[in-house]
Image (spheres, rainbow, N blue to C red):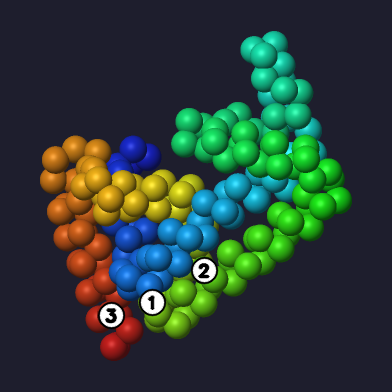
Amino acid sequence: MMGLLDLEKHFAFYGAYHSNPINIVIHIIFVWPIVFTALLLLYPASPIYDLSQLGFPQSMTLDAALMCFACWVGSSVLADRLGPSLAVKVGLASQLLCWTGQFLGHGLFEKRAPALLDNLAQAFLMAPFFVLLEILQLVFGYEPYPGFQARVNAKVESSIKEWREKQIK
């Protein structure tokens, strides 16, 4: 049973779809711009909750999670400066470029369909955090807790082995 807060299970699921080093780099480059430009495109939308009472701008479109706050602020500033028409064009062009890169990475290098085809919500929610943790692990050796990376890697290897065996059958 995959618990909501079972990071090992979530990261292993996503990691099993991202084992090729080139595909990992492609995702590191494109995932956060997808988040950023999605927020750029949502900028003119009505807010989910009016946070103006707390000092936030009226135009806030999503309750910002801590990890996405910088993207939200940056995309809001950019959208304000570009104006609605150009912001939509920049957002759509970036989405097209980034999603094309993602699918090419899976098709050419991973040789496996993206995770979003098996679990859309989990893939969209985990992608930014997976990429962030991947960078923190590579650059700083960071782990949420000791042994996390080793346990996730073991689950990833097991999942990839299982997937390959199914492909052979």
Residue furthest bottom in the image:
168
Q: Is residue 151 left or right of residue 4?
A: left
Tag shown at residue 102: 2
Residue 42 visible to an observer of this rendering = no
Question: Where does the image place residue 86, in percent across and percent down from the top left?
Answer: 82, 52
Residue furthest right in the image:
85
Q: Amino acid at mark 2?
A: Gln
* Residue for badge 3: 164
Residue 69 visible to an observer of this rendering = yes
In whole angstroms, how far apart are the C-alphas of marks 2 and 3? 21 Å
Q: Residue at x 77, y 37 (%)?
A: 80
Question: Where does the image place residue 31, in percent across and percent down from the top left?
Answer: 51, 56
Up-down relation of residue 133 to residue 99 (above or below): above
When asked about the image quadrant of residue 19, the answer is bottom left
In whole angstroms, how far apart are the C-alphas of marks 2 and 1? 10 Å
Q: Amino acid at mark 3?
A: Arg
Question: Where does the image place residue 142, in percent across and percent down from the top left?
Answer: 24, 43
Residue neighbourhood size for the residue with mark 2, other residues' Cα within 10 Å, grouped as few (<14), some (14–19), many (≥20): many
Q: Is residue 145 left or right of residue 22?
A: left
Q: Residue at x 57, y 49 (%)?
A: 35
- Judged by depth in the image, the label closer to the viewer, 2 or 3, is 2
Q: Residue at x 51, y 77 (%)?
A: 104
Q: Secondary structure at mark 2?
A: helix
Residue furthest top in the image:
53
Among the two numbered marks 2 and 3 on one chain, the one whose residue lies closer to the N terminus: 2
Q: Secondary structure at mark 3?
A: helix
Residue neighbourhood size for the residue with mark 3, other residues' Cα within 10 Å, grouped as few (<14), some (14–19), many (≥20): few
Instruction: Give the quarter of the figure containing the C terminus.
Output: bottom left
* Residue for badge 1: 110
In whole angstroms, how far apart are the C-alphas of marks 1 and 3? 12 Å
Q: Amino acid at mark 1?
A: Glu
